[in-house]
């Protein structure tokens, strides 16, 4: 297999295991490339990539841009706030105009679930769409880089217990992580958090649910921490930060319930003192910045295997 089985990356749900393995193998190669003195390869020369971020981003947008530049693509970061969207132009019209200008790949983040799928459906195969996070639905490249980071440290997935902690309901990262970890055959995917922040269909997602942090963390190999997604909550759902940290914040004492070599991941942005203590975020078991770095290789792999 030398190419992805899909024209668009809309969600982990749509990927075959062969796709995931191809992305991981290609990321291994690019990881070496980006550590060389000459970091660029010509793979996507003459390809134009547009970053369309209708929601804020630091890590995803920047690593997509760096990844595209390492592949020698031309990159456009459209400033949505100053684009003709503010004059009432629809997203599909915006995309079609950019396709007419020669854009080949769109990286799209939107607060509304399903927007990348809607775009892909409307443009057929005139360009590739990569979902960079749609509402609380999916964030596939984040899950790919998280699972890849786990693989870098733990090598195989079959014997692992992995805990996803926090606001599962409002997190697109959590959904994509649950899908990918199950596809990769992780022994046990756990979700830990208050009942109020669990999706109503959690029993259908092949996970073990815990409302008690210490019980859920017992003997896990990796912990994926999540931010409380206040921007997607109604005011009465937002827990007090102090109470939340007391019950679900990851501190050094709680981390001892996990295996001694357990790694701690967080997709960012992290809120110190809310979901994670500074001593853990910067501690020996944290691989948070390694995750960010892996985001470049994974996004290079996704774009290269999609366009070539
Ligand atoms: N992990 C993630 O999506 O971070 P950004 O919002 O900074 O892109």
Image (cartoon, rainbow, N blue to C red):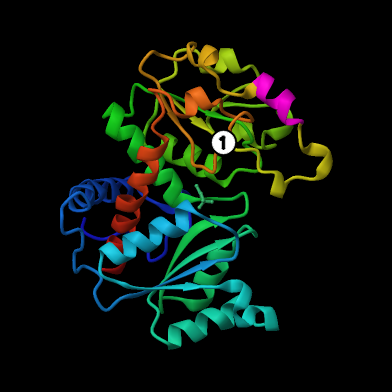
Whether residue 90 is in magenta: the answer is no
- Front residue of this view, candidates 289 and 98: 289
Residue at (33, 26) in percent of width and height: 158
Question: 105 left or right of 118?
Answer: left
Against 186, residue 120 (above or below) is below
287 up-or-down from 90: above or below: above
Which quadrant of the view contains residue 21?
A: top left
* 183 relative to 42, above or below: above
Residue drawn where x is 63% and y is 23% of the image? 248
| Spot occupied by residue 306 in the image (x, y as percentages of width and height) | 32, 64
Q: Residues within 10 Å of mark 1 (few under 14, many from 20)?
A: many
The reply, left or right, for residue 160 in relation to residue 167 is left
Range of the magenta residues? 240-247
The question of residue 243 being in magenta is answered with: yes
Q: Which residue is painted at 60% across and 18% down in the image?
A: 213
Residue at 67% x, 37% y: name it.
Answer: 199
- Residue 10: x percent and y percent? 47, 58
Q: Locate residue 129, reporting x and y percent.
A: 45, 67
Question: Quick one: which residue is furthest to the right in this view?
Answer: 236
Task: Work out whether residue 102 or residue 12 is closer to the camera in this orientation and state it.
Answer: 102
Q: Is mark 1 within 8 Å of ligand 1?
A: no
């Amino acid at each position: 297999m030398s190419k992805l089985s899909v024209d668009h990356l809309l969600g982990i749900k749509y990927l075959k295991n062969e796709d995931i393995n191809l992305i991981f193998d290609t990321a291994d190669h690019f990881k070496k490339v980006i550590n060389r003195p000459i970091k660029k390869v010509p793979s996507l020369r003459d390809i134009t990539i547009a970053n369309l971020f209708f929601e804020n981003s630091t890590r995803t947008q920047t690593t997509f841009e760096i990844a595209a530049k390492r592949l020698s693509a031309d990159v456009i970061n459209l400033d949505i706030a100053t684009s003709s969207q503010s004059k009432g132009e629809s997203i599909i019209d915006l995309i079609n105009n950019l396709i007419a200008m020669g854009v080949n790949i769109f990286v799209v983040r939107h607060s509304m679930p399903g927007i990348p799928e809607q775009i892909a459906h409307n443009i057929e195969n005139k360009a590739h769409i990569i979902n960079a996070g749609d509402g609380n639905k999916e964030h596939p490249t984040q899950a790919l880089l998280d699972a890849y980071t786990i693989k870098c440290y733990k090598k195989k997935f079959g014997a692992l217990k992995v805990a996803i902690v926090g606001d599962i309901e409002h997190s697109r990262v959590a959904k994509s992580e649950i899908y990918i970890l199950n596809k990769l055959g992780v022994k046990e995917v756990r979700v830990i958090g208050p009942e109020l922040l669990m999706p109503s269909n959690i029993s259908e997602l092949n996970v073990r649910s815990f409302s008690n942090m210490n019980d859920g963390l017992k003997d896990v190999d990796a912990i994926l921490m999540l931010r409380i997604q206040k921007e997607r909550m109604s005011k009465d759902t937002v827990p007090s930060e102090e109470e939340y940290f007391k019950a679900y914040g990851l501190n050094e004492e709680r981390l001892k319930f996990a295996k001694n070599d357990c790694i701690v991941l967080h997709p960012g942005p992290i809120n110190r003192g809310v979901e994670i203590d500074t001593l853990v975020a910067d501690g020996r078991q944290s691989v948070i910045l390694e995750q960010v770095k892996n985001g470049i290789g994974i996004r290079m792999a996704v774009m290269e295997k999609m366009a070539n």
